Image (cartoon, helix red, strand yellow):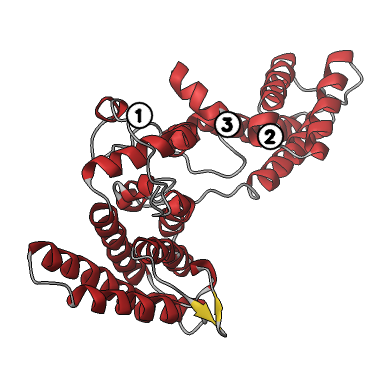
Amino acid sequence: MQDLESKCSLLANVGLVSLYELMYKFKVAELASLLCQLTLASRMAANFDSKNPGQRSPDAAVEALLKNLEQLQSFQHELQLDNALINQLYMHVEQIKNGSADLRANALRILIEDINGGLVANLSTRFFLFVPSQKARYYNNVTAFGDSAFVFREAFEDMYDAGTCYAADMPTACVFHLTRVAEFGLRALARKLRVSLRDHGKPCQVEYATWNKVLDSIDGKIRTIREKAAGQKKNEQLRFYADAANHCRHIRDLYRNEVSHTRTRFNEHEAFAAMNRIADFMQLLAEGLYSDAERKKIIVSNWAGYGSVLGNLNDGKTELRSGDAEDTQGLQSGDAAQDGSGTSS
């Protein structure tokens, strides 16, 4: 229970919690019991007044009501009750305690109904998003992208946001973030090939070039590779770079242009397909642009910046496909790692 208390205390104003955590944080069982008791107290007060018009409520009924109101006061922070209801509760509790409250049965019935009405109005403005279990694992989680989430540092936040949007049933927003992820991959590919980009006759950084311009330059580099002497290395390079370039074209035509130019909206199944395709693309780049040793060096060099973030976002359950933390520690003393943007040191 201590772990649960610690987890609930860290919840932000907006966040996803399990049904169990929801019941615990908002004391659902106690609140439901309290509402039932207040409803019953109102009925009993009405019944007593019908038989004893204008008479004072029994002491036991008054004491039970006071206990219920004090219990409701204790929920004010968890339920974020509005100030009007908090002040109303405080006033009634103090009046009952100091003897100034009107304790006739009908007056107490009206008091209880007012409190009940205010409580229901407050609870009616507390909204919770239901996420099906098969989608919940994508919320605040980047593991769908494998090692690439840790290799391509700049893309991490958009990977995270893509998963969250998918879980929250916002497929078009999911695809938007996915195309941003893919663009970081495109840039890494262009940098690895050392493409030269120009715009209006002047040198242009890859961040400011269009997809078409970058892809055309990549195609030029691939043609240069084709002109090399035949051999296994040439064949492997051609297969990788041609495969990566084709991924880029498909992503551009299927998703990037459509979502960036507001041509269409995407449904859940399309967003899921996009996530799988772009995750495969990013993993292809992570494994193709860098050797295993280079990839581990990049992960180690980026880990210091991600350590606390990953602990919060993924609940400490994220695994590195390329090896665990112990495997990567020995690489820290090696040569300077390449950064996650794909620039060689």
Q: Which mark is residue 70?
A: none
Of the numbered discs in the image, which one, if any, rests on residue 31?
3
The quadrant holding residue 62 is top right
Looking at the image, do the residues carrying marks 3 and 1 touch, with CB atoms under 8 Å apart? no
Task: Name the one closer to the observer, 53 or 262.
Answer: 262
Residue that numbered label 1 is attached to? 332
Q: CA distance from mark 2 to mark 3?
A: 17 Å
Mark 1: secondary structure: loop
- Tell which residue pokes out farthest to the right in this image: 100
The amino acid beneath tag 1 is Gln
Tell me how far mark 2 sits from mark 1, CA to CA: 69 Å
**Residue type (three-letter) at the residue carrying disc 2:** Ser
Q: Quadrant of residue 276?
A: bottom left
Q: Nearer the viewer, residue 99 or 156?
A: 156
- Is 339 left, or right, of 147 in this rendering? right
Give the crowd class for mark 1: few <14, some 14-19, many >=20 residues within 10 Å. some
Front-lying residue, 273 or 81: 273
Work out whether mark 3 precedes mark 1 in sequence or the reverse, and give the earlier one.
3
Sequence-first tag of 2 and 3: 3
Q: In the visual, does 84 lie left or right of 145?
A: right
> Does 266 appear above or below 329?
below
Q: Position of residue 212 (x, y in %)?
A: 42, 81
- Asked if residue 26 lies left or right of residue 149, the reply is right
- Cα distance between the residues tagged 3 and 1: 53 Å
Q: Amino acid at mark 3?
A: Leu
Which mark is in front, 2 or 3? Answer: 3
| Residue for point 24% across, 28% down | 327
